[in-house]
Amino acid sequence: MEYSERLQKMSVIGAAGKMGSGILLLTAIEMADTSLLPENKNKHFVLNAIDVCSECLTGLMEYVKVQATKIAEKKLGLLRQLYADRADLIENFDIIDQYVWDVLKIIRPSTRLEATYDSNIVFEAVIENPTLKTKLLSQVKQNASENTWFFSNTSSIPIAELDKSAGLDGKLIGFHFYNPPAIQKLVELIKGENSVDGLEEFAIEYAKKLGKIVVPSNDFAGFIGNGHFMRDAIHGILETQNLAKEMPYTQALYAINSVSQNFLVRPMGIFQLIDYVGIDVCKYIMSVMNPYLPDEDLHSDLLDQMMELNVKGGQNSDGSQKDGFLKYEKGRPVAIFDIETKKYVNIDSFSKDVDQKLGKLPQNSIAWKQTLRMKDKFDKLAIMFDEMMQMNTLGAEIAKKYMENSRQIGIKLVNMNVAKNADDVNTVLMTGFFHAYGPINDYLKK
Amino acid sequence: MKLRKKIYLTAGYNTIALGTGRNEFNPKKARPELEDYIKEAGQRVLTQIGGAKNIDEGVIANFMAARYNKQGNLAAFMPYIDEGLRFKPATRVEGACGSGALGLASAFRSVLAETAETVLTLGVEVQNTYKAVYGADILALAGWFKMRKTGHVYFFPGQFSDRAGSYYEAYGFDYARKGFAQWYKNAIENARLDPTAQEYHNTVPNLEEQYLKAKPNGKFFVDHLTVFDCSKVSDGASANVVASEEGLLKMGIDKKDAVEVVSFAQVIDDITKLPQNPLELTSIKKAAAEALKDAGITIDQVATVETHDCFTIAGILAVEALGLAKPGEGAKFVAQGHTARNGKIPMNTTGGLIGWGHPTGATGVHMANTIWQQFTGKAGDAQITITKDKPYGLSINMGGDDKTVTAIVYKKIF
């Protein structure tokens, strides 16, 4: 079966979720674009959007409509060519409307898993729960044709095990998008054992058509992305507990969050990132990964405590940030959760003191946002970190330790053979986590 | 044709040209709407002339409110300006981006026909209701709709990009871009002197460098032009009063606060045809020549020109069409600074369509207002000196790609 033929029948399970909706959108666009090519004019494309939540599917269709419109507005040159033979489509208005309809009409929203049974590709993007994933995938497998292939968006579960537990006979591939899938460029591709012929090739072509950068990861729990993130998070938590010996816990947490963002030139601080991903999700990923790591303990009591108090972070359905370690107003952190009093303490009430204790940023420091459009960002970062090396303020010391730890995590991932090489680790962090630079670097070597 | 009686133009008013570039513009926030602009410009004219009772007739010039604002029958907005205009005659005229000057021509004719002594002439357009990709569709209606299907996503930039491409091919890319860059620089620098201009807040230090650094790229826009070559997407209105001598008396306006309209020429070309010669703005050439001839003057007697620079290339080609430079030498003429505010013949002294803005239906009226401001000492920081040996001004307003052109010659009253 060639690419476009296989693409004709696909399903996304968990399509209305945070990851699923992005995967569905990108796939629907890819299917529509393929269907518009002259050679595919008579082919029929179907994308089943499966989710347990019926209302969410309604919201999903609205989301796809809005996003498809934006996408159409940006590629009108191409669309005018694709619709050149349609005499009735003249204005940009007409062409955009038709394109959005051509995307929407491919999608079949349903709450019934049965709808997936005649698909060539079934993409699961349900919550990170091995039991649930196994149950769904095996049910589809038992009812689908021999030719059906399976994609999983798992960010941590070993693919070979999932393949085995669901009885997929090497027809499962790990295809891990980063959040949000429509924006983040990275896909981690994980081949299981005895992977069937053609599956990987198809996955690579599909990823490229979606405009993604593919980094292969070995089939080890957590893969490259979470392999780094979870260890990095544990480091942040330990550093916070360490610093809390010298200052109140909330202030220590603020300090570590602030250093990991500003001194390390990252898009957000470590606790904001944990909130963004969801404290529950992080805890879950750690629990999936931990059994595979005999010489490490990837676990945090702090995350357990937060979960017990039902402070979970994550996002509301409109994409806004829920409160977690930090409390947010218009997307900006304004307070820190105090685990003792179970109340948020305003950042304003102590930030000046803590900032003073941390000390100033290097004079040559740059903000993460500036690096986005900087052509010589690596040179500028080198200058900044050179200066930071000479500093012995509290902030600089924490930052240096943080960077070194992050670097060691990266090297470990290569040594453990999770990543093929340092470049792959760096690509994952830069394209999946939007870091300005990769963790395996020489900035602090001198 | 020589005019059978004297016509004057007075009491000009321009709203700000609102759109990207203005600090107060935020596409996500509510903005003044079509009727707000009509009211503001209309009322500010009426207060200068003793009120609505002194107006005999109204003209509203507008290109495409039916699509930008889903509004037709615009003439009936005249009484919304002032109740005193109820039950008076009013007309709406449309000639794409040349609507404004068509409105003025309509007013001139009423005064010449002696069916009115005073005509309130108002041009208006509110374009920011749609994103650029959709606005491109609406503006494309200035061309033949049957050409839309095969045209560019951005139809009119596509048309003028083709003209620019021909110009590069004939005379050289770098040579041409240097002239275009100077045109752009003049436009922004002049706009910085007029508080109503869309580029009034522009503070970019080196405009020429900024212009030349941007390279045309068909993948993102059109093949031969960049965003700096284009006029603005603007909301705004401009208005004034066209009057006979009796009309001025009735309004109590001193002649020193008016300009004389010496001649006007209106030229139309076939909308179903592509330009015969992409290197020439033929209709502009004919309209300008006819207007100058009717005024009994030559271009050397013209102190300042307002020309329709919807794109830099249109500015350069207009310089050539006016006979200020030979074909192919317009870019040099501009690069040498001859059209700058301190040059031989200052053009677009408040920024033109690229600097002041281009609320399409209002532009022709705005051009007349700029010349009126310059000739009555009301141009503020943008004021240039007009001397008795060169007392004339010329405006050229164009609809479509050289299809609906009106040239007007004005004279300063000393």
Image (cartoon, coloured by chain):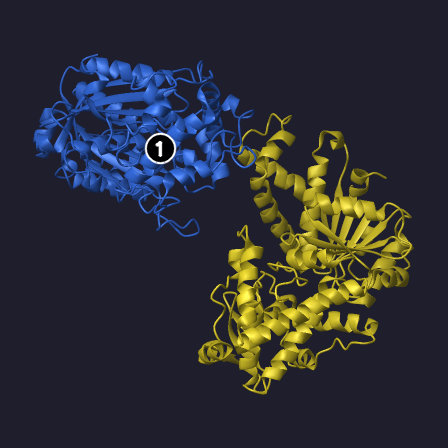
Chain colours: A yellow, B blue
Residue visible at 80% across and 52% down in the picture: A122
Figure check: B28 above or below A224? above
Q: Position of residue A275 (x, y in %)?
A: 61, 70
> 10 Å neighbourhood of mark 1: few (<14), some, or many (≥20)?
many
Residue B286 seen from this side: yes
Q: In which quarter of the image is residue B392?
A: top left
B218 left or right of B210 in image: right
Residue visible at 30% across and 21% down in the picture: B406
Residue A55 seen from this side: no
Figure check: A124 above or below A83? below
Q: Return the residue nearer the eye: A114 or B128.
A: B128
Q: Position of residue A239 (x, y in %)?
A: 63, 79
Q: What residue type is labelled 1?
A: Gln
Residue visible at 13% across and 22% down in the picture: B389
Residue visible at 58% across and 56% down in the picture: A378
Question: In the rendered image, which residue does mark 1 sit on?
Answer: B182
A41 left or right of B212 in image: right
Q: Return the residue nearer the eye: B194 or B190.
A: B190
Figure check: B59 above or below A345? above
B158 left or right of B198 in image: right
A405 left or right of B6 in image: right
Q: Where is residue B72 in the image (x, y as percent from the top left)?
A: 38, 34
